[in-house]
């Protein structure tokens, strides 16, 4: 089995390289006439079909959205909407946010029968100014999260800003990893959001996207958080 996986892995890498060399097409393609362009794109299509055929497995994923840029929770909520569209259940547990009502919470609660939404935080540390109380709420959120992770009827569980709770020392990476290993169902997905995801969590995950800031109106223009964009 291991040898078969290694062979497939080598074939996939070879095909990926060929696909890269052929390019995406469009006006930047080097072909000087449409016949050559169609031939190139047919080769690209054949390679793409072969790439797909070699990827046979499916499993529930552990997904991380991290980085100092905007859009981590937004990306996770996109998965939530997609999952709801397939008539599957979603649980969202917010570890830090919780003192304000967001547009996404209002919208997604329209799918009341398939979504469980829990905002259990009380805000940022400079707002709460009580780390003992903060840790208590994080621990409560994590106990609730474990229950949803155990429940195979929930296709997607989003642990929003849990990476912040880890950064603050309210939870330990190994307890998150151990619980997911122990309780996660085979075909269900778990998303962890928040900047500063620990290296051990990143190594454990199946999919990791880092969202970096290039420009942000709060920094460059003094624009405050506003509805429809931040909440």
Image (cartoon, helix red, strand yellow):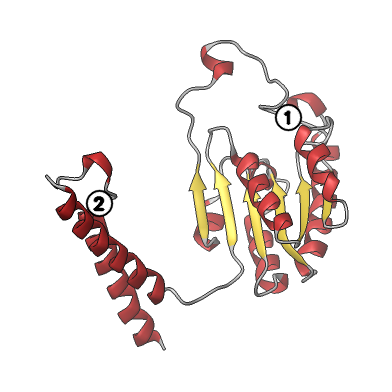
What quarter of the picture does the N terminus occupy?
bottom left
Q: Which element carries disc 2, helix, strand or loop?
A: loop
Q: Which element carries disc 1, helix, strand or loop?
A: loop
- For label 2, the residue is 23
The quadrant where residue 127 appears: top right
- Determine crowd level at label 1: few under 14, some 14-19, many 20+ residues with C-alpha closer than 10 A: few
Image x and y of residue 195, in percent: 58, 40
Q: Nearer the viewer, residue 47 or 13?
A: 47
Above or below: residue 40 compared with residue 126: below
At 49% from the left edge and 30% from the top edge, which residue is drawn? 213
The quadrant where residue 131 appears: top right
Taking the view exactly as shown, the residue that stands out farthest to the top is 222
Image x and y of residue 145, in percent: 78, 57
- For label 1, the residue is 231
- Determine crowd level at label 2: few under 14, some 14-19, many 20+ residues with C-alpha closer than 10 A: some
What quarter of the picture does the C terminus occupy?
top right
Query: Would residue 166 be seen by someone viewing this image from the given angle?
Result: no
């Amino acid at each position: 089995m291991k040898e078969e996986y290694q062979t497939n892995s080598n074939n996939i890498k070879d095909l990926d390289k060929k696909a890269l060399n052929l390019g995406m097409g469009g006006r930047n393609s080097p072909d000087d006439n449409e016949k050559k362009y169609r031939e190139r794109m047919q080769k690209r299509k054949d390679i793409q079909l072969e790439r797909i055929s070699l990827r046979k497995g499916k499993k529930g994923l552990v997904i991380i959205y991290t980085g100092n840029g905007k859009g981590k929770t937004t990306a996770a909520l996109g998965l939530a909407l997609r999952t709801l569209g397939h008539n599957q259940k979603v649980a969202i547990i917010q570890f830090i946010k919780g003192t304000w009502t967001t547009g996404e919470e209002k919208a997604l609660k329209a799918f009341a029968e398939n979504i469980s939404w829990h905002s259990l935080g009380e805000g940022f540390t400079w707002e709460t100014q009580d780390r003992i109380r903060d840790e208590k709420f994080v621990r409560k959120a994590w106990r609730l999260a474990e229950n949803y992770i155990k429940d195979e009827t929930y296709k997607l569980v989003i642990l929003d800003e849990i990476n912040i709770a880890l950064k603050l020392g309210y939870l330990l990476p190994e307890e998150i990893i151990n619980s997911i290993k122990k309780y996660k169902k085979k075909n269900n997905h778990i998303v962890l959001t928040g900047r500063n995801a620990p290296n051990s969590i990143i190594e454990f995950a199946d999919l990791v996207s880092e969202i970096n800031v290039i420009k942000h109106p709060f920094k460059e223009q003094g624009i405050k958080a506003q509805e429809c964009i931040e909440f």
